[in-house]
Image: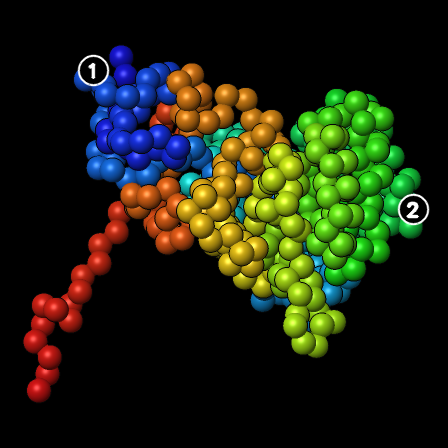
Amino acid sequence: MIDLLLRGCRLPHRDGLADVAIAAGRIAAIGRIEEAARETVEARGRVVTPGLVEAHIHVDKALLSGRVTGSAGTVEEAIRLTGEAKRRFTVEDIRNRARQVLELAIAAGTTAMRTHVEVDPIVGLKGMEAVLPLKREYAAALDLQVSAFAQEGILQAPGTEALLRQALTMGADLVGGVPYNDTDAIGHIAIVFSLAREFGVDADFHVDFFDEAEHLHIREIARQTIAAGWQGRVAVGHLTELAALPVAEQEAIIADIAAAGIGVICLPATDLYLMGRRDARNVRRGLTPIRRLLAAGVPVALATNNVRNPFTPVGTADLADMAFIAAVASHMGTPEDLSELVATLTVHPARILRLPDYGLDVGCRADLVVWECERPEDVVAALPPRALVVKDGRVTIEHERRTRARWREEPARP
Ligand SMILES: [Zn+2]
């Protein structure tokens, strides 16, 4: 018996319309389906994509506007301002803000998410205590991966390594580092890899987040990824410095990234907001070279990063916004480019998060979004509302909207 039948779907990379049959949480058939179903949804030619995958967000420090004074002009300032707010975080406070972000993301079609959660001598394990239980609380709507993230550094913040180990013992899914915010970047990277190997988990780095190519820690991460045999299990976020290099040097590093099987996560809202601050004219964009990375076969995800805090004062936790921004900021405007941007919200981040059985093939987990548009590229170009979100074969979100053009109904006053 079919549990859910989506009739008349426009699927990316497929001509014409198709029905999608879902049974036992998985896609059971795609094509013309006559069988009866427990629930049938008429897609009427609307686009259906796999569920959106948020590869990099910080739910623990989201929604701080109102309690942080001053706005950050640099990465260092954003870390300092957020660090001050963090001293007053409580478990309940973190969990409430995290829940609000999860609700926004789920309503927008996100069915899997990796969140970084800070672990350091300031906040201790409060973030872990707050966020880890949300994995189960939200499991029916979203797969949540929690990264134990050393935002304040490891070597310059004594006690952090032991806290990271505790967080991983508590159930964190992976370990996150930030080599540019430490006294010894290479030592920092080595500790992250030693924890990854000790616990058998993936690693995710905030890396090279400056205007000029002054760190390029990515080279050391690629080297240690191969030395650890961790190919396919490492991601890096930001990597804005790569864009500052001459093209030939970019290509050489991109070849190393591809060889190490590292995924790259571009965070367009934060990167555009915090990069280029010293440029008085011709302000640079500060985005990693998305198109060049994609051309080399590197999985590239676009992700939200921060939602309304000193790193990024705006944010909706709707991933489609990030593709819209990147289309403009990275000059990706052809129908092929826009379709590739849809992949940076879906199949690429799914690969980076190593989500099993993800996609629009028979046998895949039925995580789907029905969009209010009829061309796949309009997912990015038109930011259409979501009609329906499906997680593991069950409808999780149904949006109803009604717009009344009252100006047409009522005569204008004389
Ligand atoms: Zn981040």
Image position of 176 (left or right of 50)? right
Q: Look at the image and tell me in which quarter the N terminus lies.
A: top left
Q: Earlier in the sequence, mark 2 or mark 1?
A: 1
Rendered location of residue 107, percent (x, y): 41, 44
> Looking at this view, is 173 or 18 the one in front?
18
* Residue 31 x, y percent position in the rendering: 28, 21
Find residue 353 and report its image quarter.
top right
The residue located at (76%, 54%) in the rendering is 246
Give the Cα distance between marks 2 and 1: 62 Å
Asked whether 243 or 314 is in front, the reply is 243
Is residue 198 something one can see in this rendering? Answer: yes
As displayed, is residue 82 above or below residue 234? below
The image position of residue 211, as x and y in percent, is: 75, 61
The residue where tag 2 is placed is 184
Residue ID at (87%, 35%): 190
In this view, 275 is above or below 186: below
Of all residues shown, which one is farthest toward the top?
A: 1
Q: Which mark is residue 35?
A: 1
State which quadrant residue 251 falls in: top right
Expressed as whole percent of the image width and height from the top left, the position of residue 410 reads: 9, 72
In the image, residue 107 sits, relative to residue 396, either above or below, namely: below
Q: Is mark 2 within 8 Å of ligand 1?
A: no
Q: Is residue 168 visible?
A: no
Tag 2's secondary structure? loop
Relative vertical location of residue 334 with respect to residue 136 in this rendering, above or below: below
Q: Amino acid at mark 2?
A: Asp
Task: Specify whether tag 1 is near ligand 1 (CB below 8 Å).
Answer: no
Q: Secondary structure at mark 1?
A: loop
* Residue kind at label 1, given as amino acid type: Glu
At a point 80% along the width and 55% down the height, the residue shown is 213
